[in-house]
């Protein structure tokens, strides 16, 4: 990554919307750091995206993973796209609507 270019960070960028956003940011001339849980999928996505893209593992439900990801960020971030998400682990269809504060703290 070039120190004279702008840096974008895109979470959840190994597929779908995150991957598309990373593609567009790269096309605009930015360097992109992508993050996702799966090292295998993240490395494959970064390889498909090209030389101005790099990958760092990020599991937003794991505080040590978040700390390691922050360490991987080199320099100021010009664009942050927080596309990563996690789902409630309960198996009830109404989980999100019926979650209390304690459920939310455990999950997020």
Image (cartoon, grey):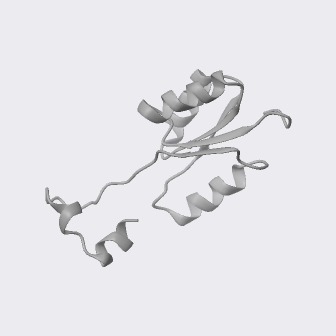
Where residue 60 appears, x then y in whole percent? Answer: 49, 57
Is residue 91 toward the left or the right of residue 21 in the image? left
Using the image, determine if residue 104 lies above or below residue 38: below
Q: Quadrant of the C terminus?
A: bottom left
Q: Along the line of sight, which residue is nearer the eye, 69 or 16? A: 16
Using the image, determine if residue 5 lies above or below residue 48: below
The quarter of the picture where residue 95 lies is bottom left
Where residue 61 appears, x then y in whole percent? Answer: 45, 61
The quarter of the picture where residue 96 lies is bottom left
Q: Along the line of sight, which residue is nearer the eye, 69 or 6? A: 6
Q: Residue furthest right?
A: 4
Q: Residue furthest left?
A: 93
Where residue 13 appears, x then y in whole percent? Answer: 51, 37
Q: Quadrant of the N terminus?
A: top right
Where residue 71 appears, x then y in whole percent? Answer: 71, 56
Count of number-bearing discs = 0
Q: Residue furthest bottom?
A: 102
Is residue 19 toward the left or the right of residue 71 in the image? left
What's the residue at 25%, 75% (across, down)? 100
What's the residue at 85%, 35% (across, down)? 4
């Amino acid at each position: 990554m070039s120190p004279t270019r702008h840096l974008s960070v895109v979470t959840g960028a190994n597929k779908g919307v995150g991957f598309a956003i990373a593609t567009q940011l790269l096309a605009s001339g930015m360097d992109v750091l992508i993050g996702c849980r799966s090292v295998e999928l993240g490395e494959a996505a970064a390889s498909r995206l090209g030389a101005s893209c790099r990958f760092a593992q990020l599991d937003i439900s794991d505080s040590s993973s978040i700390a390691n990801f922050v360490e991987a960020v080199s320099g100021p971030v010009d664009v942050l796209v927080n596309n990563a998400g996690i789902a409630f682990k309960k198996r009830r269809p109404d989980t999100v609507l019926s979650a209390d504060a304690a459920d939310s703290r455990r999950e997020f």
